[in-house]
Amino acid sequence: MTRILSMAQTEFRIALRNRWVTVAVAMMVLFSLVLSAAGSAPTGDLGADRLSVIVASLTSLAVYLVPLVALLMSFDAVAGEVERGTLPLLLTYPLSRTEVLLGKLLAHLAVLTIAIGAGYGLAAIGAWAMDGRSVEGLPALWRLTWSSVTLGAVFLGAGYALSSLARRPSGAAGLAIGLWLGAIVLYDLGLLAALVADNGGVFTTRVFPWAMLANPADAFRLFNLAASEATSAAVGLSGAANTIPPWQALTSLALWPVLALALAVAAFRKVTP
Amino acid sequence: MKMLTLSHLTRRFDGVQALTDVSLTVGAGERVALLGHNGAGKSTLMKIVLGLIPHTSGSVEVLGAAPGSPQARDGVAYLPESAAFHPALTGREQIAHYLRLRARPAAEAAGLLDHVGLGHAADRRIGTYSKGMRQRVGLAQALIGQPRLMVLDEPTSGLDPVSRRDFYTILDDLAAQGTAILLSSHALTEVEARTDRMVILSRGHVVAEGSMADLRRKADLPVRIAITPSDLPCSVTTLKQALPGAELSGDQLVVTCAQSGKLALLGRIAALAERVSDIDIQPPSLEDIYSHFSRRAGQ
């Protein structure tokens, strides 16, 4: 445990000095503030408090931004050590490769938690200042916060796996962007296209719910939107998938970080220093 | 007690034989130098000992355990060729991290950095260090917790002569306390004086092994004697007649002879004492011996 914590402490320090903490916090804060300012129009009409509405907007934001920040922080984790030539020495120390990755994960999760906390926190304060009823939205915000961190853990693990497979930072960066585009942007577009073409057939009723659950980003969106009634109308895809109970989405979201980390460890074990 | 035992070690990379039937032991307190051209297999051998890469056949025992096992990693320190660290960390932070990984108090970092002469730069980022300073950080981490076996890959490359001397003094102290040391080097002359035994690798084979005196004897290379003739007239001609095979090189006469014929030749030179103003005996250098063994192995 001391070894994992020491890895984490060192990695966090590096993230701080490389301005990763600053960049991640700035991105989250900026986008959260923009969203909460822009999301002011529908307030009142829906009968929901302002914070609950903002949480719905933040959910859509987090689906894109959290995986992006996580991949940006993690793609260098193994490939960077290989390129700098620091990996052989580290691996002669009495700590396992799993411990190396767990240490990095802990540090990167801390950075991500700080960024998410700052972004959502500011949005919440803004909402509360404008609408006293916003306290009602706090449970939804809390749910969004921890599920965002979980989603981040999935993509951190995926980033370590890609970093180990690529062995060069430039290659790992390419793979990371590819994964982000594929899993976050193209996956949903593909599902939408299939839904339209299928027009209520077997795909829509049988395959589609599983396809949503299989993608951690969709599971994250489903879980947050299904859990808060007021917002389910706001998002297109989830309308078609509102038959999926939240616990299934939550199970998918809980399993993915473990799976991603296991993949990362398996890929890292294959790296010859 | 043997800290490292390799027997009949073989390693193949995609059909290329990187190491062939290498047998080698390093005992407690022993300093063994691994010599060889680039690509001779020195780094491969070290990586196998450290458990970083597997071997194809033969056996390796590190501190009585398998290479790379927790027990072996606990007692083995490594200094990679041109040691690299994250540029954003300070020397103190980096060493403190390594100390914690070895379950030792991070406060020992200051002492270690002082020991390698980096005390003044402990709180500067490693990114601002020179190559020699980074090499010292590498040495400082290798000294953590008095390792039982040290594996040093070209440890003095990038160090100035004074730092090299300090470096070997530190190694001597460690060896005196029982640490086994396996180091590779290109700087043959410094290794000659500072190690107990040398192993010459060529294309993955051990071509020679032993102390400097052993290797000299086995190689049996000719001794070179340079004679400066005296000012008497015709000294050069007289000497040339008396010493067949002598050749003029600059204003000196140079004769070579086998180790066994050295004394007889010196006797003949001494008989012509009035013709000789000075004499210089040059035994074969380590470079000569090294080339001899490498060449014999087909390099």
Image (cartoon, rainbow, N blue to C red):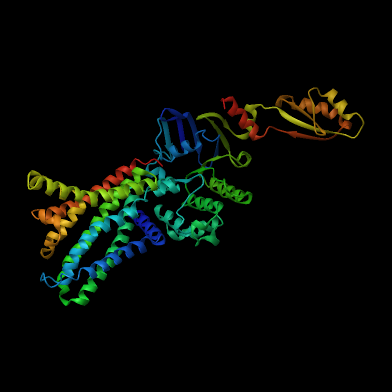
The answer to whether B264 is drawn above or below residue A202 in the figure is above
* Residue drawn at 17 percent across, 51 percent down: A252
Question: Does the image show residue B271?
Answer: yes
Give the residue drawn at x 33%, y 58%. Answer: A107
In the visual, does B34 lie left or right of B12?
right
Foreground: B14 or A244?
A: A244
Q: Is residue A96 in view? A: no
In the rendered image, which quarter contains the C terminus of chain B? top right
In the rendered picture of this protein, how many numbered marks are placed on residues? Answer: 0
Question: Which of the two residues, A136 or B250, is positioned nearer the viewer here?
Answer: A136
Residue A261 locus on image (x, y percent): 27, 49
**Residue lying at 28% horizontally and 65% vertically, measured from the top left:** A31
Judge by depth and name the residue closer to the eye, B261 or B297.
B297
Residue B206 image position (x, y, % from top left): 52, 29
Can you give x and y, in whole percent of width and height, for residue B202 in the image? Answer: 54, 30
Query: Left or right: B113 with respect to A235?
Result: right
Nearest to the observer: residue B203 or residue B260: B203
The picture places residue A137, in percent across and down from the top left corner, at 16, 69
Left/right placement of residue A159 relative to residue B287 reads left
Residue farthest to the right?
B233
User: Taking B10 as reference, is A121 above or below it?
Assistant: below
